[in-house]
């Protein structure tokens, strides 16, 4: 709905500051796009589970760059991790646990597959991360059965990363109750501090499916290639996945799989580009965080990826006087009056009366920013860099400032 409204505004000549859309701004590395071009004539169908060399490359990549012990026979290739999450939900019966503050597609997928679900409470003070004690309390008070946990780190929408200790604690509870974990690690290498975010699969390998893909780390969302690593305990499902793939999408496009082969070789130049992208994202995230905190807007502090949650709760009274009492109404108002697009928290499982929004800080030309950063040794990633290379983010934040000034 918001995207349609944005298109209308843009068509009428208005500039929109788009904090709503979470696409990588960096552009795919030329080595990957060259591999795609070189295989334009690969017109054959590939095996349903994917090109064997690609499955092997991804297993090595996971072992070396994500702390996930994976076997090549357990890596399955699909047209985006979204499709693989959905097919896994279709395949696995039970109740899906979704922490509040989770990716927008989990619940629609669970509903579409006609599975049971439960939303678990999280809190701002814990950066909306699921706490092991809350998972434990929920499991103790629930009827016995098979449960699945949808865990995403680095997180969309909060930007939070679960620490090793937090993952270990959650893994302990999962083991206690036999919970199967869907670990969505699509932003793993876009962690701001380390080369990759910790994975719960390090602590609970036997029952964790790890999802990833080319969309975020390699800035190739439109290529539509993702993978899932199936744990030992579920390996008997692999032939069933194979049939499902064969009966639905057949196999991922051959040229794209050859391009992915190059990406998942993860040579030094590509690693460096991913790292530099994360450094630029970190600078923009910190600037945005500091700017909004100064305005007394509560924010989650991003540690990886493209997003943060922001909360106008401190202004609830003034907003109430303007009849802007829920996040959906306020998001419409901000778009119409200030041309600022934010997604309301309702998309991420928060009640409408909580004035929470997801802010994506990727409305900038990442190729230009990356090129400048990589070709100048002494670049300061300061406020000037952001003003020059992320002008829409900069101006969009100033618009939010203007709006907040009217509330005081
Ligand atoms: C948390 C999360 N998981 C999965 C996906 C799906 O990515 P893809 O299907 O492009 O691999 C996205 C994309 O926005 C995401 O943000």
Image (tube, rainbow, N blue to C red):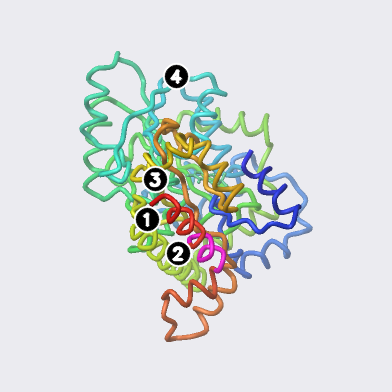
Q: Is residue 303 magenta?
A: no
Image check: 108 left or right of 408?
A: right
The residue tagged with tag 2: helix, strand or loop?
helix
**Magenta stretch, residue numbers:** 391-397
Mark found first going from the N terminus, 4 or 1:
4
305 vs 41, nearest the viewer = 305
Residue 281: image tag: 2
Image spot of residue 256 (x, y percent): 66, 54
Quadrant in the rendering for residue 167: top left
The residue tagged with tag 4: helix, strand or loop?
strand
Within 8 Å: ligand 1 and the Cβ of disc 2?
no
Quarter of the image with the N terminus is: top right
Q: Nearer the viewer, mark 3 or mark 4?
A: 3
Whether pointer 2 and pointer 1 mark residues with C-beta atoms closer than 8 Å, the reply is yes
Whether pointer 4 and pointer 1 mark residues with C-beta atoms closer than 8 Å, the reply is no
Image spot of residue 222 (x, y percent): 65, 52
Q: Which residue is mark 1?
A: 302
120 vs 166, nearest the viewer = 120
**What's the CA distance linking mark 2 and mark 3?**
23 Å
The residue tagged with tag 3: helix, strand or loop?
loop
Residue drawn at x 35%, y 34% as measured from the top left? 207
**What's the CA distance linking mark 3 and mark 4?**
32 Å
Residue drawn at x 53%, y 25% as measured from the top left? 90
The residue tagged with tag 1: helix, strand or loop?
loop
The answer to whether 380 is drawn above or below residue 134 in the figure is below
The answer to whether 247 is drawn above or below residue 218 in the figure is above
Mark found first going from the N terminus, 3 or 4:
4
Residue 312: image tag: 3
Q: Nearer the viewer, mark 2 or mark 4?
A: 2
């Amino acid at each position: 709905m918001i995207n349609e409204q944005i298109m209308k505004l843009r068509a009428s000549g208005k500039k929109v500051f788009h904090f709503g859309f979470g696409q990588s701004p960096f552009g795919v590395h030329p080595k990957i796009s060259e591999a795609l071009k070189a295989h334009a004539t690969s017109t054959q169908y590939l095996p349903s589970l994917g090109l064997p060399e690609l499955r092997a490359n991804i297993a090595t990549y996971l072992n070396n760059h994500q702390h996930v012990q994976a076997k090549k026979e357990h890596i399955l290739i699909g047209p985006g991790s979204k499709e693989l999450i959905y097919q896994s939900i279709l395949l696995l019966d039970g109740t899906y646990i979704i922490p509040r503050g989770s990716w927008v597609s989990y619940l629609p997928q669970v509903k579409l597959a006609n599975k049971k679900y439960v939303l678990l409470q999280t809190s701002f003070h814990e950066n909306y991360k699921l706490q092991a004690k809350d998972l434990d309390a929920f499991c103790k008070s629930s009827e016995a059965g098979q449960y699945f946990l949808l865990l995403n780190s680095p997180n969309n929408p909060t930007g939070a990363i679960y620490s090793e200790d937090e993952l270990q604690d959650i893994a302990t509870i999962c083991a206690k109750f036999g919970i199967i974990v869907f670990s969505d690690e699509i932003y793993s290498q876009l962690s701001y501090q380390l080369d990759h975010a910790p994975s719960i699969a390090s602590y609970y390998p036997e029952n964790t499916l790890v999802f990833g893909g080319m969309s975020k780390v390699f800035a190739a969302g439109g290529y539509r290639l993702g993978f899932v690593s199936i744990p030992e305990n579920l390996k008997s499902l692999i032939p069933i996945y194979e049939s499902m793939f064969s009966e639905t999408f057949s196999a991922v496009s051959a040229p794209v799989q050859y391009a992915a082969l190059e990406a998942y070789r993860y040579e030094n130049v590509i690693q460096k580009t991913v790292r530099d992208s994360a450094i630029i994202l970190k600078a923009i995230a910190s600037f945005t965080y500091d700017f909004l905190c100064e305005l007394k807007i509560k924010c989650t502090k991003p540690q990886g990826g493209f997003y943060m949650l922001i909360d106008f709760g401190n202004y609830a009274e003034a907003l109430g006087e303007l009849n802007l009492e829920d996040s959906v109404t306020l998001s419409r108002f901000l778009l119409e009056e200030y041309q600022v697009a934010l997604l309301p928290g309702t998309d991420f499982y928060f009640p409408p009366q909580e004035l929470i929004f997801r802010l994506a800080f990727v409305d900038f030309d990442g190729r230009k920013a990356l090129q400048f950063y990589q070709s100048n040794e002494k670049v300061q990633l300061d406020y000037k860099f952001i003003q020059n290379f992320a002008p829409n983010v900069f101006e969009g934040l100033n618009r939010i400032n203007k709006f907040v000034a009217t509330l005081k």
